[in-house]
Image (spheres, rainbow, N blue to C red):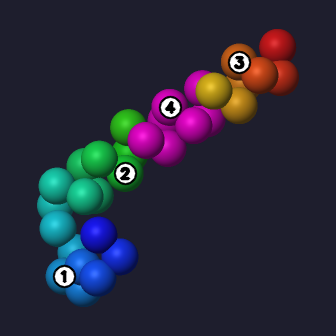
């Protein structure tokens, strides 16, 4: 995974939901 040089649309698509989940988790932990 770290060896991937070419930016894949699949990875970019996965990146957004992952960041959203992380943000939600952080907000949930703060509460």
**Separation (CA) of disc 2 from disc 1:** 15 Å
Q: Which residues are magenta?
A: 18-24
The tally of labels here is 4
The earlier-in-sequence mark between 3 and 2 is 2
Q: Which residue is mark 4?
A: 21
Q: Is residue 21 left or right of residue 12?
A: right
For residue 6, the mark is 1
Quadrant where the C terminus sits is: top right
For residue 15, the mark is 2
Quadrant where the N terminus sits is: bottom left
Q: Is residue 25 above or below residue 10?
A: above
Asked if the residues shown at circle 4 and circle 2 are in contact, with their CB atoms under 8 angstroms apart, the answer is no
- Where disc 2 sits, the SS reads helix
* Residue at screen point 83% across, 23% down: 30
* Residue at screen point 77% across, 22% down: 29
Neighbor class of circle 4 (other Cα within 10 Å; few <14, some 14-19, many 20+) is: few
**Separation (CA) of disc 4 from disc 2:** 10 Å
Residue 8: x and y in percent read: 17, 67
* Residue at screen point 71% across, 18% down: 28
The earlier-in-sequence mark between 1 and 4 is 1
Q: Is residue 29 left or right of residue 10?
A: right
The residue furthest right is 30
Q: Which residue is mark 3?
A: 28
- Where disc 3 sits, the SS reads helix
**Separation (CA) of disc 3 from disc 1:** 34 Å
Residue 19: x and y in percent read: 49, 44
């Amino acid at each position: 995974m770290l060896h991937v040089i070419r930016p894949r649309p699949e990875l970019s698509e996965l990146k957004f939901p992952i960041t959203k989940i992380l943000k939600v988790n952080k907000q949930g932990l703060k509460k």
